[in-house]
Image: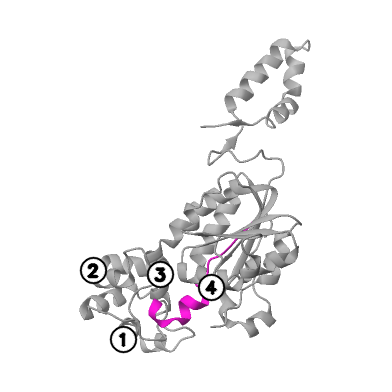
Amino acid sequence: MNHISVLSRELIAGLNIVPGGLYLDATVGNGGHSKLILAAHSNVSVIGIDRDLEVLSIAKTRLFSYYPQRLQFWHGNFANYEPNGLLFDGIIADLGVSSPQLDIAERGFSFRHSAPLDMRMDRSQLLTAAEIINHWDENKLADLFFHYGEERFSRRIAKRIVQQRPLQTTTQLAEAIARSVPPKYRHGRIHPATRVFQALRIAVNEELSSLEKFLERAPYWLKPGGRIGIISFHSLEDRIVKQKFRHSELLEVLTKKPIVPQADELQENPRSRSAKLRLAQRNSYQSSSMGNRRVTASPLLRVALYLSFLVDSPLSPKSCLSQSPIFLSFINLIYITKG
């Protein structure tokens, strides 16, 4: 079970780790990225989050020498984390499935070994891949495979699954999928079951909705000048990260295009081939966190102050109007809380 953290050089460089800084690893996994952050400076601290209790226990073992003085852990979905007033110098999330989840057959994430159709990152939850495969109707399955797996043969596959169910193991499902698609598709660059397994995993763990919620909240947890780096592994994730970064009023995007692995990393770790890193920085001129409320300029305030300026100014109205763009630019710097 050899886990190699992807895009480590690029992520650590992009974080611009500061001495004495506090960092949040929202998907601590085996602890590879956290270990590099802790090693950057002797007084850096990390809070590590993971929803998978088994994976979290591995991170605790690997990073035991840093615990608890410089390292704390929180078990749960990163979308539900509450920093309780803490502000971070940097936040990272590696959205990939960890090596233990792929390599331990009984977890049901991979079709390389016969195992129950599970795919739960948090084993305390009730919904499993078996529940979806054996109880969802054909149209719902087809929509799931198409939207979350971008599978072009989603209708064929859903029909075959419904005909053959109940399906209990990963290999049974993979075989049913392979029989559903044209022969040429079965021997392509990736296994024909890959996209369906991705779609099931996303649905079981509510990955996309959790990511959206996390990215809406995380910028408020950064100190001014703090950075956030997200590593995604498929276009659905990357699209969400790109849009959330771009449309956040608190963030400045640092990566116009995503950073991808270099040739040496691809050779050492083939699992990194689809990884993409995007970075953003908290605007230094923004005020500190106001919970989850947005901080915006009030149009009413702008109008009121502008009218007050017109009334009180000794200048003529015509002169005032000629200067109004400058004055309004000044007013735009005034921010109030919008409920």
Tag 4 near tag 1, CB within 8 Å: no
Mark 1 and mark 2 residues within 8 Å of each other at the beta carbon: no
Q: Nearer the viewer, residue 256 or 92?
A: 92
Q: Which residue is mark 1?
A: 179
How far across and how far down the image is residue 208, in percent? Answer: 45, 60
The residue depicted at 62 percent of the width and 65 percent of the height is 277
Distance between the Cα atoms at labels 2 and 3? 16 Å
Task: Note whether residue 172 is visible.
Answer: yes
Marks 4/2: CA distance? 34 Å
Query: Which label's residue is closer to the chain start, 4 or 1?
Result: 4
For marks 4 and 2, the one nearer the N-term is 4
Residues in magenta?
91-107
- The residue shown at (71%, 62%) is 14
Which mark is nearer the camera, 4 or 2? 4
Circle 4 is placed at which residue position?
A: 58
Within the magenta stretch, is there residue 172?
A: no
Residue 106 lies in the magenta stretch: yes
Give the SS element for disc 4. helix
The amino acid at mark 1 is Arg
Find out whether the residues at labels 4 and 3 contact each other: C-beta distance under 8 Å.
no
Binning the other alpha carbons within 10 Å of mark 2 as few (below 14), some (14 to 19) or many (20 upward) gives few
Q: Is residue 110 above or below residue 227?
A: below
Quadrant assignment, res 325:
top right
Q: Amino acid at mark 4?
A: Ile
Query: Badge 1, how many Cα within 10 Å: few under 14, some, many 20+?
Result: some
Q: Earlier in the sequence, mark 2 or mark 3?
A: 2
Q: Which mark is residue 201?
A: 3
For discs 1 and 2, the disc positioned in front in the rendered view? 2
How far is the residue under mark 4 from the one under mark 1? Answer: 38 Å
Q: Which residue is mark 2?
A: 135
Dot placed on the residue nearer the N-terminal end, 4 or 3: 4
